[in-house]
Image (cartoon, rainbow, N blue to C red):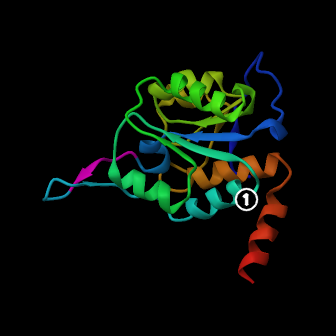
Amino acid sequence: MKFKKLIKPNKPLVHWEKIKLVVFDCDGVLTDGRIIYNSAGTEVKNFYSQDGLGFRLLREAGVHTAVVTGRTSTILERRCQDMKIEFLYQGIAHKVQKINELLQELELDWDNVLMMGDDWNDLPAMFKAAVSVCPADAVEDIKQLADYVTSNTGGHGAVRECIEMVLTNKGIYEQALLAYLDQIS
């Protein structure tokens, strides 16, 4: 794997088998963080195509997926529908509160959560999660505070890398991949 582990004193050992929910920010994680408006004033975002298969592998492995973002975008809504992401929460200023509500609904707790973010608004949820991950181009302080930093940047493979890290550390990457290959054979 390409991800970089940062040594965190006093960080409890991660029990990867307990990870049941993976939460992603959007801008800077699912995308490269740029916000582009075309000449008609419509927002444009670029997503990484290989993330879609990663989300499918997580879903089929029984891991819940969520996107919790501070902005609101119809483009993100469409992408989440395309990738069959279970939960999408937009316009969320207090991510911990929203994730707490989701955890209650799913009957899970923070020991079951991996959170991937790139900026200060993600940090409270990243601190509460069992595992925190950020892309290689996250804000510098976030990179120092995250448990893992991907080698790929936001919108350019960081999410897929994170998903593969989850599946690998849960010991089910090969099983998930073989099950997928059987489906398409």
| Relative vertical location of residue 3 with respect to residue 125 in this rendering, above or below | below
Q: Quadrant of residue 84?
A: bottom right
The location of residue 69, given as percent across then percent down, is 44, 37
- Find disc 1 in the rendering and name its residue: 60
Residue at the image position 80 percent from the left and 69 percent from the top: 179
The location of residue 133, given as percent across then percent down, is 62, 37
Horizontal arrangement in the rendering, residue 91 relative to residue 177 (left or right): left
Circle 1 packing at 10 Å, graded few (<14), some (14-19), many (20+), is few
The location of residue 61, given as percent across then percent down, is 76, 55
Is residue 56 visible in the rendered image? The answer is yes
| Relative vertical location of residue 9 with respect to residue 54 in this rendering, above or below | above
**Magenta highlight: main SS:** loop
Residue at the image position 51 percent from the left and 65 percent from the top: 49
Is residue 145 visible in the rendered image? The answer is no
Kind of residue indicated by mark 1:
Glu
Magenta stretch: give its range.
33-37
